[in-house]
Structure formats: C-alpha cells, structure tokens
Amino acid sequence: MINLKFSYPIFVFKKGDKNLYASDKKDKLEVYSKEGGKFYKELKVIDSNGYVYIMSSSSIKGKASIWDSIKHLQPMYEMDLVFEKIDEITLKDLKIKAMNQVKLKPKFWLPIDTVEGIQEMVDKAKTFKELILIFK
C-alpha cells in the first residue's frame, strides 16, 4: 500500500541507477521479488502533475497474490511504502532529467528509438503524462 495518491502515470528514479522507470499502474510499485527489495531504497517518484516525492520508509506487508507470483515466475511480496511530497518540477526540467537518463544507456532505448528520435518525441510532449508514457 502507498500512503499517497500519485497521479499516474509516474516516473520512478532510483539514486545511482542509470535506468528510468515509468509506470501507469499502482501495483507495479507495490509488488516485488525477494531480491528486488533492494530496489526500494532511495526512490524518487515524479507524477503526472509534476509533484516530486521521496520514499521515507518501506516494509514488507506480506506475500503478494498467486497471480503476481505466476506473472513474475517467482514468489512476490507486497510492500507498504511511505512517501513524502517534497517539491514540484517543471515539464522542461523533467524532459532534461529524462533525456539525461536516456543518454546514460542509449542502446537500452533502441527498441523505442535512437537518442535523437527519443529527443524529438520528448520535445513534442506537451504534458507530464505524454512525456512519461513515451517511456512506458
């Protein structure tokens, strides 16, 4: 369970991680594998309203549904996550932040497009939602 209501879709950034995570579903953030628990350290979420949140605490709530475990081919667990709203970001600054992440791992993003192609899509995004959904 998450203590706040994010406006989905959301970006999730993890300190020191070169990846960029985009999610349009609440349950993707609340369910994890045993090894995946390390993911839940120093998370920052930016929602479709441009609000910035940091995770202040997390704890295992219990086992996730059988369906979640089957989908992920391993036992999954539910998390209780506590976030605090700390700031707002402009669309312009979020575009820069997203592209900085893309440039760290350009080959990873080739299924979407080249860095230049992604930059064009990002430049055309008129809302936070449009921007985040490029990376979903």
Image (cartoon, grey):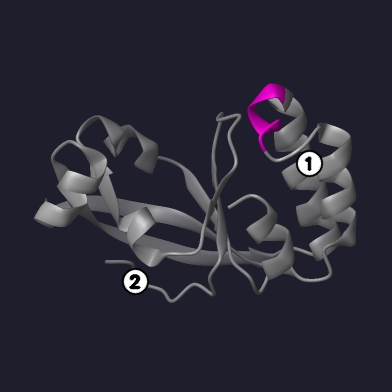
Instruction: Inspect the image, locate mark 2, and give the three-letter code of the amino acid beneath it.
Output: Asn
Find out whether residue 46 is within the magenta segment. Answer: no
Q: In the rendered image, which residue does mark 1 sit on?
A: 99
Task: Choose top left, top right, bottom left or bottom right for residue 131.
Answer: bottom right
Q: Magenta span: helix, strand or loop, mainly?
A: helix
Q: In the image, what residue occupies the spot 69% across and 54% down? A: 134
Q: Residues within 10 Å of mark 1 (few under 14, many from 20)?
A: some
Disc 1 is placed on an element classified as helix
Q: Is residue 35 left or right of residue 42?
A: left
- In the drawing, what numbered circle is on residue 22? none
The residue that appears at 12% across and 57% down in the rendered structure is 65
The residue under label 1 is which amino acid type?
Met
Magenta-drawn segment: 107-111
Residue occupying image coordinates x 35% and y 62%: 82
* Horizontal and vertical percent position of residue 130: 72, 66
Res 52 quadrant in image: bottom right
Where does the image place residue 48, in percent across and percent down from the top left?
63, 70
Residue under numbered circle 2: 3
Q: Is residue 101 left or right of residue 121?
A: left
